[in-house]
Amino acid sequence: MGEPSWQETLRLRLAERNTRESAYAPIIEQYRRLAQQTKLLKERNVSLLRAMSTSRPNPSSSTVFVPGTADDSPVKAAYITSLESQISSLRDELATVYKTQGQNAQRLLAMTETLREKEELSRLESENLRKARDEIHVLRRKVEQHSELMAEKDRTHQVLHDEINTLQLELGQIEERNGTLVKDNAKLLQRWLDAKQAEVNEMNEANDFYENMKSRKESQRKDGDSADTKSAPHDQESGNGEVKRNSEATTTKDGIPSHAEKDVTLTPNG
């Protein structure tokens, strides 16, 4: 994982400050070396001048010393001392260079290790980025498929909605037709019930008429029996009268059969 944002900002600012402050480091180092060299040269010149002042001049009053004579030993000693001091300073500089080189080697190793870690981190981030891109590509394909599926569902929904509307219209027509049929059936049923009720009423009237005629006939029969018991001498006359009554009961003045004759053939069921 990467560093937090504030740590990364602080590191970048420190790196910028170090770069800004170390921009003139080589020039400063060159000036330091030049100053040190100048100091060494001044010390050597001073030592040479001191040696020349203590030495004896040539008989020719010349300022040029002839090498190989005994009078140039202080100058040589001063020159040797200056060279030794220069060698010592160069050795110190060389030791400083070696030390700086070792420090640089250590820094190089550390930077190499840091670079390796950064490369490994960059590789991991690249791998994560590649995986993220693959996931984004897969998700985009899923989104496209989902959009196509939703469009197909919308079309199917529209078709079903149209079919539902059509079926609702047909259902309304069928319900209206059923209502009409129910009303017609109710009317027909009422008419049938009325007809049957009329038939029942007629049958009841016929049964009542039959019962009445039957009761009248029974009463007439009883009356006839009582009359026979009262007037026995008048058998012939009563017989003729009974025949006459029977004939009168079976016919009317217009010659139409009476209700009694009809009721004999009727049954309780009509």
Image (tube, helix red, strand yellow):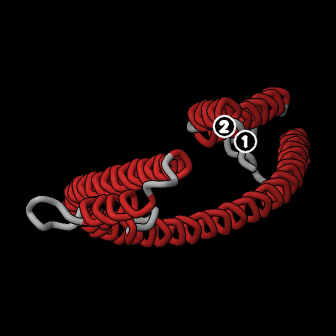
Q: Which residue is mark 1?
A: 3
Q: Is residue 168 visible?
A: no
Q: Secondary structure at mark 1?
A: loop
Q: Along the line of sight, which residue is nearer the eye, 23 or 62?
A: 23
The local crowd at label 2, few if under 14, some if 14 to 19, many if 20 or more residues have their Cα within 10 Å, is few
Mark 2: which amino acid?
A: Glu
Q: What amino acid is at disc 1?
A: Glu
> Closest to the observer: 18 or 155?
155
In primary-sequence order, the first of circles 2 and 1 is 1
- Pointer 2 and pointer 1: residues touching (CB < 8 Å)? yes
Provide the secondary structure element on which disc 2 rests: helix
Q: Quadrant of residue 48?
A: top right
Q: Position of residue 196 (x, y in %)?
A: 32, 58
* Residue in the image at 62% along x and 36% along y: 12
Spot occupied by residue 223 in the image (x, y as percentages of width and height): 47, 46
Q: Where is residue 57 drawn, in percent x and y? A: 76, 35
| Residue 183 seen in this snapshot | yes
Q: Is residue 59 left or right of residue 197?
A: right
Picture disc at residue 8: 2
The label shown at residue 76 is none
Vertical comparison of 212 with 270: above or below: above
The residue positioned 33% from the left and 66% from the top of the image is 243
Mark 1 Cα-neighbour bin, 10 Å: few <14, some 14–19, many ≥20 = few
On the rendered structure, is 183 left or right of 6? Answer: left
Q: CA distance from mark 2 to mark 1?
A: 6 Å
Q: Is residue 161 left or right of residue 227?
A: left
The one of 85 and 29 positioned closer to us in this rendering: 29
Q: Residue at x 12, y 67 (%)?
A: 255
Q: Residue at x 70, y 39 (%)?
A: 33
Q: Nearer the viewer, mark 2 or mark 1?
A: 1
